[in-house]
DNA sequence: GCATCCGAGTGTACGCCGTACACCTCAACC
DNA sequence: GGTTGAGGTGTACGGCGTACACTCGGATGC
């Protein structure tokens, strides 16, 4: 017999695994995504997956990278307000396509490069629009609840007490690398700090919370006293 | 030998179970909360818990009731803005005490009475302040991201396709009971509906999303053009 | 005083889960 | 044509939620 007759059995790789995981979560729900079920979907034994992802947590991180990459890139030469609006609305479209994404995104504390890139470019829009680093810092917090991105433990190494302590030299090198790749993030993460340490001590998140809340409340009040009753956009079907 | 010497072995009850669950989640994290671990904590065999809660999902619902009850009641005779502010800040304090609460709250789709009561009284604040039902509807959506409460599937029976269909008569009776107990919720949930059906068809959540987003963006812009650079409240340590 | 009952707590067991570890297979390369 | 190493396999372990049949003890009725 020449050759073999079995199906070609395309080789597994990390990307095929991640794509299949996203697809499975989309159609069966995130709670139905188990390593065993995913392996079955790929016609492979469960342990085969571990040659491509370290464990289930890393699988979820990989899935996040996949979906964040679906967000439209920043529109060039666009005024800050329109640019942010487009970006956030695009992120929202992605979240609607993947209903499980919000909870997974919010459960991940380790920010992956795709996520950091997304933050970085969004921050850049405000800064390019002339916003001060301080205002941008607060504005990102206020936006945070709608774009899941910006939380105070971004640079906070103590966020996860279970993580083993890191060598200060290693930590400094990491900060250096961060500063080069994500200058805007670094800029605004330290903008609200009082002392001079580059490692931000975290920001006053109660202040951030009230900032956003008061912004909303003042907006509500303005709409109310100006006799707002129907929507500014037409709502005819 | 008179009597017995064993510890009195206080009887278990639903409340003891829920309190222990909240305590365990507080100190060991929500991922460490298993029926087995909780039972051990209570000096009892795992299956004993099932005499007091139907299953783990109902345990989580019960935990939500416990923590929502910790939110301060509405301050009487207070202007709407201050009243809402106090309430939301109190909810935030509760969330800070129970770091696991946010994710659990957001994962529950079945709103328990405690949660509905919370929504009801908050909505009442806006209405009492003279807000139209329509504006209150949008305002609750905009607040939603910060107070986890108000989502479009509140009255949407089709939210969970896995749930068995309900007898229309039963459904109508349910709506009637809802209307009596939660008039404000009903009022604003139907405010944005175009047709006359009492069972809201769900609202245009893209509109709600943009409403909140634009409110924030306009606020950001106002702050920006007015030269906002430092915080309106003093930030000295 | 004694039989009855019934709900709280028990014990065992099942089918899921993530994944450690030893093994096999086979294409690529010297 | 033997070696190697990466990809895929098989078995096994401990943990999970919970179904189901049970025991036990205190309250209740006679």
Image (cartoon, coloured by chain):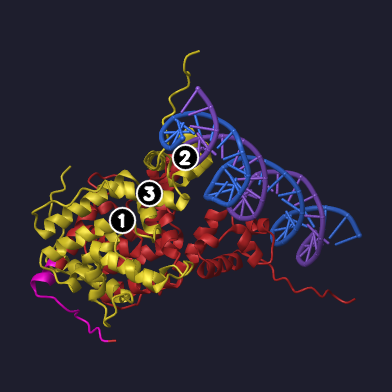
Chain colours: A red, B yellow, C purple, D blue
How far apart, in angstroms, are the residues tagged by discs 1 and 2?
A: 25 Å
Looking at the rendered image, the disc whose residue lies closer to the viewer, 3 or 2, is 3
Looking at the rendered image, the disc whose residue lies closer to the viewer, 1 or 2, is 1
Q: Residues within 10 Å of mark 2 (few under 14, many from 20)?
A: many
Residue B205, given in percent of the width and then of the height, sits at: 32, 74
Residue at 47 percent of width and 18 percent of height? B5
Q: Are marks 3 and 1 on the same chain?
A: yes
The residue singled out by tag 3 in the image is B62
Q: Residues within 10 Å of mark 1 (few under 14, many from 20)?
A: few
- Specify which label sits upstream in the sequence, 3 or 1: 3
Residue at 67 percent of width and 55 percent of height? A47
- Specify which label sits upstream in the sequence, 3 or 2: 2
**Residue furthest out toward the top:** B1
Q: Residues within 10 Å of mark 3 (few under 14, many from 20)?
A: many
- Specify which label sits upstream in the sequence, 1 or 2: 2
Q: Secondary structure at mark 3?
A: helix
Residue A157: image quadrant is top left
The label on residue B113 is: 1
Q: Which portion, as a residue range, is magenta?
A: A221-236
Is residue A3 shown to the viewer in this render? yes
Residue at 22 percent of width and 57 percent of height? A134
Residue B163, given in percent of the width and then of the height, sits at: 46, 66
Residue A230, given in percent of the width and then of the height, sits at: 17, 79
Chain of residue at mark 3: B
């Amino acid at each position: 017999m020449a050759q073999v007759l079995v199906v070609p059995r395309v080789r597994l790789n990390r990307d095929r695994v991640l794509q299949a995981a996203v697809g499975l979560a989309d159609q069966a729900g995130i709670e139905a995504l188990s390593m065993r079920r995913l392996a079955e979907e790929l016609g492979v034994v469960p342990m085969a997956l571990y040659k491509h992802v370290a464990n289930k947590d890393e699988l979820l991180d990989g899935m996040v990278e996949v979906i964040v990459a679906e967000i439209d890139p920043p529109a060039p030469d666009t005024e800050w307000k329109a640019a942010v609006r487009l970006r956030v609305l695009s992120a929202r479209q992605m979240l609607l396509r993947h209903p499980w994404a919000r909870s997974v995104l919010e459960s991940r504390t380790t920010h992956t490069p795709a996520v950091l890139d997304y933050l970085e470019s969004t921050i850049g829009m405000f800064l390019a629009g002339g916003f001060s680093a301080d205002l941008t810092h607060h504005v990102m917090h206020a936006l945070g609840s709608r774009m899941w991105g910006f939380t105070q433990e971004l640079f906070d190494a103590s966020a996860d007490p279970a993580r083993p302590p890191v060598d200060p030299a290693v930590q400094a090198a990491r900060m250096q690398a961060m500063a080069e790749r994500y200058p805007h993030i670094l800029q605004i993460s330290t903008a609200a700090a009082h002392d001079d340490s580059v490692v931000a001590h975290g920001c006053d998140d109660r202040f951030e919370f009230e900032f956003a809340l008061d912004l909303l409340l003042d907006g509500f009040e303005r709409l109310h006293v100006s006799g707002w009753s129907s929507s500014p956009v037409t709502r005819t079907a």
